[in-house]
Image: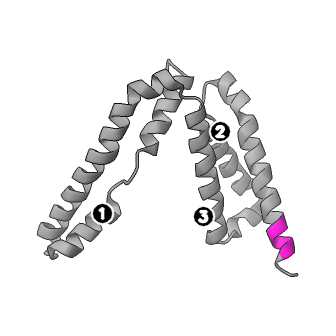
Amino acid sequence: MSDVMPFGVLVGLVAAAMLLAVLSNRLSTRLRVPAPALFLLAAAVASDVVPQLRVVPIETVQRIVTVALAVILFDGGMHIGRRRLRSAAGAIVWIGTAGTLVTAAAVAVLAHFLFGLDWVPALLIGTALAPTDPPPWFSRCSVAARFPAGPE
């Protein structure tokens, strides 16, 4: 029973934060600033105002960030539109696949020659450090779709 109350409080806080994130879309449209930027600013202010937030366990922060990332990416995908997606899909796929491969290979070559590692550990380091998906590009296209002139 002792785990139920802290878990309930955590779920309530995450739900409140997500509600604020969803409601921030109206403000972001008026200010022409992406909603995730407003949410990040609010989190930074809250951590300075409420001293108890400075001692939150890292596992809790990781869980909140994971949920927030899912919401941010979902929000970005909801506003891109088919026409904008079709025009950006080639670049997203190209950068997501070729960019990942080139980055992994370059890091592996550097690890092999600079640090004298064998090829297998060098390739493992390369694949661990290479980006594995194109959501940052998808999110950028989403911002461009919502704010054609770009965020001010």
State the image quarter where residue 136 is shown. top left
Reading the image, the residue beneath label 1 is 127
**Mark 2 surroundings within 10 Å by alpha-carbon count, few (fewer than 14), some (14 through 19), many (20 or more):** some
Up the image or down, 127 lies above or below 133; here it is below
Position of the C terminus by quadrant: top right
Residue 152 seen in the figure: no
Q: Which residue is mark 2?
A: 38
**Relative horizontal placement of residue 7, taking residue 146 as reference (left or right):** right
Asked if 106 appears above or below 92 in the picture, the reply is below
Measure the alpha-carbon separation of dots 2 and 1.
Answer: 33 Å
The numbered mark at residue 62 is: 3
Residue 59, percent from left and from top: 63, 70
Please state which amino acid type lies under the numbered disc 2: Leu
* Label pair 2/1, CB-CB below 8 angstroms: no
Give, as a three-letter code, the residue at label 3: Gln
Main secondary structure type of the part rendered in magenta = helix
Q: How many numbered discs, if any?
A: 3
Q: Nearer the viewer, residue 144 or 37?
A: 144
